[in-house]
Amino acid sequence: MIPNKVLITGSNGQLGRELSLQLKEKGIGYAGYDIPEIDITNKESIREVMDAEKPDCIINCAAVTNVDGCEEQRVLAQQVNAEAPGYLAEEAASRGIPIVQVSTDYVFDGNGVLENGSVRPYVETDKIDPQSVYGSTKADGEHKVMSATGQSFIIRTAWLYGDGNNFVRTMLKLAENHPEITVVDDQIGSPTSTEDLAAAIIDLLGSEDYGIYHGTAEGQCSWADFAAEIFHQAGKDTKVVPVTSEEYAAKAGKTVAERPHYSVLENRHFKQIGIGNFRPWKEELASYLKKENVLA
């Protein structure tokens, strides 16, 4: 049954903003909270908001997503990415309402799954093996949510962009003053618009098919491919210079957290229950650029 009111934590982020927009368009009540209105690492703060809003469902989009920053701020990453989702899930369980926990491809080892001599995308049942603090804390968050309540949806996504600071906007900004841009070409994933992900999550709220889901655009590319397509669709002449992750890190002159070389997720569970309409990544990009008024 579609909820009457949804509580969104992390509502100022890219996905939180898109969820708020679509819930409003669908006439579904919602309350958006972010810092400082709520401290999800504090049980009392969560309880106060829940008492005030009385939601039928929680969607937790809040996270420390700075992958390199997580390596330096491990305690904060653990509190926000792992402990807090557990607190939210415990509160949801005490009230008999479901919770959606947004997670990441970083819970996997980043190599894909070797099968019959070739690499295939990760499915929801594949073994997790995070290689960074960010990935480890997000995996811990998944575990804590599922341990606290059986009414949980874990939504893993990757390469997300929407209304906020993201790769697409960064590339377009750089293109204003740079005739060529260096971009890594040995990391493969599926650029995913918050538009399709938010729509799938909202559709899921009307079901009781709890469990783990992968939610990403169809198809795959490298970051360099993605950048080239952004410039192509936006009518920019900017040249993309492909480099390896190691070359990029050396050029940056700093130690960076391990990035997954293969982040492609298969949306198997969504397809099994007939929910979610994730378009090919180039189509999602075109839709996004149209909204941003930068299509060629």
Image (spheres, grey):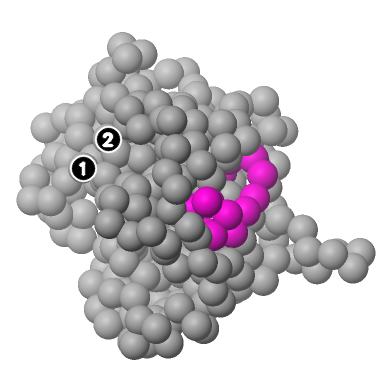
Position of 288 with respect to 63 (left or right) is right
Residue 37 x/y as whole percent: 8, 45
Q: Which residues are magenta?
A: 216-228
Rendered residue at 28%/74% (across/down): 69
Q: Looking at the image, do the residues carrying marks 2 and 1 touch, with CB atoms under 8 Å apart? A: yes
Estimate how packed mark 2 is, as few (under 14), some (14 to 19) or many (20 or more) residues with alpha carbons within 10 Å. many
Q: Going by the picture, which residue comes out furthest to the left?
A: 36
Residue at 27% x, 57% y: name it: 177
Name the foreground residue: 34 vs 285. 285
Q: Of the residues shown, which amino acid type is indicated by label 2? A: Arg
The kind of secondary structure element at disc 1 is loop
Instruction: Give the residue drawn at x 43%, y 30%.
Output: 296
Q: Is residue 148 above or below residue 112?
A: above
| Disc number placed over residue 142 in the picture, else none | none
Res. 29 in view: yes
Task: Report the number of numbered marks.
Answer: 2
Q: Position of residue 201 (x, y in %)?
A: 47, 33
Vertical relation: 187 (above or below) 229: below
- Out of 151 and 25, give the one closest to the viewer: 25
- Name the residue carrying label 2: 17
* Residue furthest top as drawn: 27
Disc 1 marks which amino acid? Answer: Asn
Depth order, front residue of 191/90: 191
Left or right of 27, for residue 287: right
User: Is residue 212 covered in magenta?
Assistant: no
> Disc 1 marks which residue?
12
Q: Position of residue 73 (x, y in %)?
A: 25, 78
